[in-house]
Each structure stands twice: as C-alpha cells, then as structure tokens.
Image: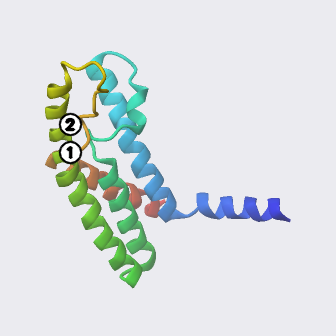
Amino acid sequence: MVLAKLVETMITVFTNKIFLSCLFAWLLAQLFKVVSTSIREKRFAISRIFALGGMPSSHTATITALLLATYLDQQITPLTIAIFIIALIVIRDSFGVRQEVGKHAKVLNKLAARRTEFEKLEELIGHTLPEVVVGGLLGILVPMIIYLL
C-alpha cells in the first residue's frame, strides 16, 4: 500500500509539466556550463554541473520556467503572482547581490594569497546581465516546448 502510493506520487511528479519545466530548464543551464567550460578549458569540466555563476544563470532559468509553466497551467492566480514576486527577488539576487559577493571574494583571495591557512573563496558566484538574460530566455523556451508537446 505504501509502495503503491509512493509510485503513484512519483508518476504524478514526473509527469507534471510545471515540475518538468523547472527540472529541464535547470538541467539544460547546468549542462551548458559543463559543455562551454569543457570546450574553453579543453578538459571535461563535470564539476560545473553544480557550480554557481556563469553562463547561463540557472537560477533565472529555473524561476522563469516555474513562473511561465505555472501561468500556462493556471493562468493568473494568487500563486502565479506570488511566484512572480519571488522571481523578481531571485533574479535581482543572482544579478546584484551575488555578483557583489563574487567581487568581494576576489579581493579577499588577493589579500589572503600570502597566507597558507586560508582556503580560497569561490569567485564566480553572481551573474552578468547577459547570463541572466540567457537564463531567462531558456526559462521561457523550455516550458513553451513542454506545453506544446
């Protein structure tokens, strides 16, 4: 009985167009980072699959996919409006706040370069405007394809 309910829930989740839109938008954004880094650095950069920052913004792609898929599924509802507000916060954060954190990390890494007991900070944390725009376009494209299928 419990196993049957679990299987039913998994089928429901993995056939849900909103979930699939978010999953594939995130996955495509992250795979693009792996492929582009692998080509640029001439090595297989699988570590980029969960990396922050870079082209395109997976945060923007995912939240945009969530917003559009929810709209396509439910039209304008309080849920759609709430997701829109969260999308504005996430996109602003990925472009602004996290970019500033990346700049601070660069400065701190330069200051700490002479000290061996400091672990280097991740510098590629935030996104540039083009990275956010491409992430947004990906987040629009994926749900449109999924909802057309």
Disc tally is: 2
* Residue assigned mark 2: 105
Q: Residue furthest top?
A: 42
- Residue contact between numbered discs 2 and 1, judged by CB atoms under 8 Å: yes
* Residue type at numbered disc 1: Val
Residue beneath label 1, please? Answer: 101
Towards the viewer: 73 or 61:
61
In the rendered image, the vertical position of residue 146 relative to residue 29, given as above or below: below
For residue 77, say whether it is visible. Answer: no
Q: CA distance from mark 2 to mark 1?
A: 6 Å
Residue at 36% in and 72% down: 83
Residue 129, given in percent of the width and then of the height, sits at: 15, 49
Residue 126, by quadrant, is: top left
Amino acid type of the residue tagged 2 in the rendering: Ala
Residue 104 percent across, percent down from the top left = 16, 40
Q: Quadrant of residue 139?
A: bottom left
**Residue 125 placement (x, y as % from top left):** 26, 41
- Quarter of the image with the N terminus in it: bottom right
